[in-house]
C-alpha cells in the first residue's frame, strides 16, 4: 500500500497524463485515446514508482524495460516519457506529424525511452521474450514489463511467445493484459471471445493475477508479488475501463481510434481539470 | 563436378565464427536437421534456441536478442521466413534496422519433392522490397560461407538465401566477397550474362558455348541482390549489346527486374530474364524441375541468341 501523499502524487500525475493524451490526439486529429486513457494507471505505476530507469540515460544497461505491445496506445507512453524527462514536452505537439520522433506506433530507433519496436499486434510480447532471454543469457536482473491489449491477444503470435517464455522460464517478464473488453469493432466477447482468460495463460505455464487495472495500489502490490515468482513468467490480467476519466468516453468502443473534435475535447479537458 | 550443400556452408561458417563472436546465437524453428543448424546445436548447445514451429515468434524474438546486443541468426525455410513471417521481418527487424540475420534455406524450385507450398520463388522479391534489408544469394558452398561471414560482420538486417539440394562448386566465384559488389567472372563485349545464386554454373556453361561459337561474353555473378551493384550493370549495358539474367526465382521482383530497373533508368538496353515464369512449382527432383521450369544453360543460350541475332540485324541494316 502506498502512503497517502505518494498516492496523491501518482494520481496527480495520472490526471496530467490523461490531459496530455486527449490534447495530443485532438491536436493531431489522429490517434488512440480510449485505450490510452484506460492504461494510464498501469503506465503511471510503472514509470513513476515500479521501474528502475534513468531518463537522462535511456540506454542504461540495467534499466527495467517497458514494451508497449498494444502499440497504438503511444499517447499514454509519450506523455509519461516526456513528463519523466526523456524528451521535451514541447515535442508532444509533433505527435503523428512529418519529421517527428513521435510516430503513431512505437519506433524504438527514433524515440528516446522506447525500448522495443511494436505496432502490428503481437510483435511486442514476442520481441519481449527474446529480450528477456537475452537478459538471462547475460545474467542480468532487470525486468521486462510488457503491456498487451486484450484484443491483441487474439493474435496467434502472442501464444507462440507465451510458449517460448514458458520453455525458457522467463521469470523476468511481468506482463499485463489490459482487459477492457473492447476492441475496434466492439466487445471482445462478440468479436472473438477471450474468456475464460485466466486458465488460458495458466495452461501456457504462466503465473496469473487478476486485478483492477485502474487501481494504483493493486497494480503496485501485485507487481511486488510477481517479482517473487521463480521460474515462471507472470501475466497480470488488469481489468480497466477504456476511456477512463472522461465520462462520455468510458466503455465506448468507438473511442478506440476516433480523435475528439473541438467540442468533445473541451468537455474532456474540463472533466480532467478537477480530477476523478 | 563436385556437388555440395549451400546450407552446409552457412552452418560451417557459423561454427568457424562462433569462438571469435561470443554474442553470436542461432535460432531455428523445428527444422534444425534440415537447415543443418543441428551441427551448431551440438557444438554450442547454450547458444542455440529451438523455437518450435513458430517462425513469427522466432523473428520477433531474434529482434529482441539483437536489442540486447546479441548477433542472432534466425534460421528457417525461405517460404516461412518471407511469407509466414513477413510482418515480423518487416516491422520487428527491417524498420528498426536491427542486427538480425535471417537465414533461409530450401529456397527456390530445387527444394524439390515438397512441391509448390515449400518452393519459395518470391522470397527475393519480398526481402528486397523492405527498406534497410540487405539480400545475399550465394551460389555454392564456399560462397555461402563467405556470405554468412560477411553478414555477421555487417551491422544490420540481412536476408541470406540457401537451397536444399547439393549444387556445383564453382571455383571462379571464390574470390573476395564484398556485400554489394558483383563478381566479374569473364570480361567480354558482345553480351552480358548476369547470374545469382546457384544459376552461376548454368551461366558459365552458356558462356562456354557462346565463346566456342566465337562470341565474347561478359559473365557477372551477383551474390548480393541488395544493395545492387548498379555500376557493374550500367557498364555492362554500355559496353555490351544486351543482358541475360538468370535466377532460381520468379522473374517477378528478383534479379532480372532489379537489373532491368537500373538499365531502364541509366542506359536502356535489352534485358531478357531467365527464371521461373509467373507460376508455382510442383514436386520433382532438382534436375527435372530445373529442366521443366527453364533454369538451364540452354534457356540462357536461347535468350542470349535473341539478343545477338537482333544485334546482328541492326549491324547489318547499318552496314547496308
Image (cartoon, coloured by chain):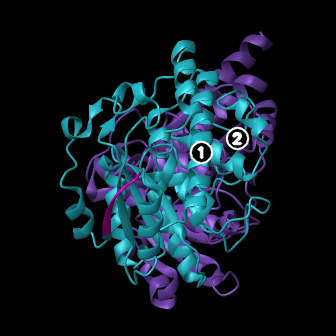
**Residue tagged 1:** A106
Q: Can residue B267 be seen in this view?
A: no
Q: Which region shows up in magenta?
A: A208-213
User: Helix or strand or loop: what does disc 1 sit on?
Assistant: loop
Do marks 2 and 1 both belong to one polypeptide chain?
no
- Between B311 and A96, the residue placed more toward the observer is A96
Which residue lies at the image location 59% right of the left edge and 45% below the top edge?
A106
Nearer to the camera, B163 or B204: B163
Using the image, determine if residue A173 lies above or below residue B100: below
Question: Taken as a whole, is the magenta stretch helix, strand or loop?
Answer: strand
Which numbered circle lies on residue B215?
Answer: 2
Decide: few, some or many residues near mark 2? Use Cα within 10 Å; few <14, some 14-19, many ≥20.
some
In this picture, residue A247 sits left or right of residue A15? left
Q: Position of residue A263 (x, y in %)?
A: 54, 13
Visible residue check, residue B249:
yes
Q: Mark 1 lies on which chain?
A: A
Specify the colour of chain A: cyan
Q: Mark 2 lies on which chain?
A: B
Please tell me the colour of chain B.
purple
What count of labels does the image hold? 2
Amino acid at each position: 500500500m502506498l502512503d497517502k501523499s505518494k498516492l496523491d502524487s501518482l494520481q496527480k500525475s495520472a490526471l496530467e497524463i490523461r490531459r496530455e493524451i486527449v490534447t495530443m490526439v485532438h491536436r493531431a486529429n489522429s490517434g488512440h485515446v480510449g485505450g490510452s486513457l484506460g492504461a494510464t494507471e498501469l503506465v503511471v505505476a510503472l514509470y513513476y514508482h515500479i521501474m528502475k530507469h534513468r531518463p537522462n540515460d535511456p540506454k542504461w544497461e540495467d534499466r527495467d524495460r517497458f514494451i508497449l505491445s498494444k502499440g497504438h496506445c503511444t499517447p499514454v507512453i509519450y506523455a509519461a516519457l516526456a513528463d519523466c524527462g526523456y524528451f521535451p514536452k514541447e515535442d508532444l505537439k509533433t505527435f503523428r506529424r512529418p519529421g517527428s520522433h513521435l510516430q503513431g506506433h512505437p519506433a524504438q530507433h527514433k524515440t528516446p525511452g522506447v525500448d522495443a519496436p511494436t505496432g502490428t499486434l503481437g510483435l511486442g510480447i514476442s520481441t519481449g521474450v527474446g529480450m528477456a532471454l537475452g537478459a538471462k543469457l547475460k545474467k542480468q536482473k532487470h525486468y521486462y514489463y510488457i503491456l498487451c491489449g486484450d484484443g491483441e491477444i487474439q493474435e496467434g503470435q502472442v501464444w507462440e511467445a507465451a510458449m517460448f517464455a514458458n520453455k525458457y522460464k522467463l521469470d523476468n517478464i511481468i506482463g499485463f493484459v489490459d482487459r477492457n473488453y473492447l476492441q475496434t469493432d466492439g466487445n471482445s466477447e462478440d468479436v472473438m471471445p477471450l474468456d475464460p482468460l485466466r486458465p488460458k495463460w495458466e495452461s501456457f505455464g504462466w503465473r496469473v493475477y487478476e486485478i483492477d487495472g485502474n487501481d494504483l495500489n493493486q497494480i503496485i502490490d501485485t507487481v511486488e508479488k510477481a517479482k517473487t515468482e521463480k521460474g515462471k513468467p507472470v501475466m497480470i490480467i488488469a481489468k480497466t475501463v477504456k476511456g477512463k476519466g472522461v465520462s462520455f468516453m468510458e466503455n465506448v468502443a468507438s473511442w478506440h481510434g476516433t480523435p475528439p473534435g473541438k467540442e468533445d475535447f473541451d468537455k474532456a479537458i474540463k472533466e480532467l481539470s478537477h480530477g476523478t | 563436378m563436385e556437388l555440395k550443400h549451400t546450407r552446409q556452408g552457412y552452418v560451417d561458417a557459423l561454427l568457424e565464427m562462433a569462438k571469435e563472436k561470443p554474442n553470436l546465437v542461432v535460432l531455428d524453428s523445428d527444422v534444425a536437421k534440415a537447415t543443418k543448424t543441428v551441427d551448431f546445436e551440438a557444438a554450442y548447445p547454450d547458444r542455440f534456441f529451438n523455437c518450435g514451429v513458430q517462425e513469427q515468434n522466432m523473428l520477433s524474438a531474434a529482434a529482441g536478442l539483437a536489442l540486447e546486443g546479441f548477433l542472432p541468426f534466425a534460421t528457417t525455410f525461405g517460404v516461412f521466413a518471407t511469407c509466414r513471417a513477413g510482418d515480423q521481418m518487416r516491422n520487428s527487424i527491417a524498420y528498426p534496422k536491427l542486427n538480425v540475420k535471417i537465414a533461409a534455406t530450401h529456397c527456390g524450385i530445387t527444394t524439390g519433392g515438397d512441391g509448390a507450398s515449400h518452393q519459395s520463388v518470391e522470397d527475393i522479391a519480398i526481402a528486397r522490397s523492405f527498406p534497410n534489408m540487405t539480400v545475399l544469394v550465394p551460389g555454392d558452398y564456399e560462397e555461402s560461407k563467405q556470405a554468412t561471414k560477411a553478414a555477421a560482420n555487417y551491422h544490420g538486417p540481412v536476408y541470406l538465401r540457401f537451397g536444399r539440394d547439393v549444387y556445383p562448386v564453382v571455383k571462379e566465384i571464390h574470390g573476395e566477397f564484398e556485400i554489394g559488389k558483383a563478381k566479374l567472372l569473364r570480361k567480354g563485349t558482345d553480351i552480358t550474362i548476369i547470374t545469382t545464386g546457384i544459376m552461376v554454373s548454368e551461366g558459365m556453361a552458356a558462356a562456354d558455348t557462346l565463346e566456342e561459337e566465337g562470341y565474347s561474353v561478359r559473365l557477372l555473378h551477383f551474390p548480393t541482390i541488395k544493395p545492387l551493384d548498379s555500376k557493374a550493370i550500367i557498364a555492362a549495358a554500355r559496353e555490351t549489346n544486351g543482358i541475360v539474367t538468370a535466377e532460381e526465382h520468379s522473374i517477378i521482383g528478383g534479379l532480372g527486374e532489379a537489373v532491368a530497373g537500373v538499365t531502364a533508368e541509366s542506359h536502356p538496353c535489352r534485358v531478357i530474364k531467365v527464371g521461373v515464369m509467373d507460376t508455382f512449382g510442383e514436386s520433382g527432383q532438382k534436375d527435372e524441375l530445373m529442366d521443366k521450369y527453364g533454369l538451364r544453360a540452354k534457356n540462357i543460350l536461347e535468350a542470349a541468341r535473341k539478343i545477338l541475332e537482333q544485334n546482328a540485324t541492326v549491324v547489318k541494316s547499318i552496314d547496308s
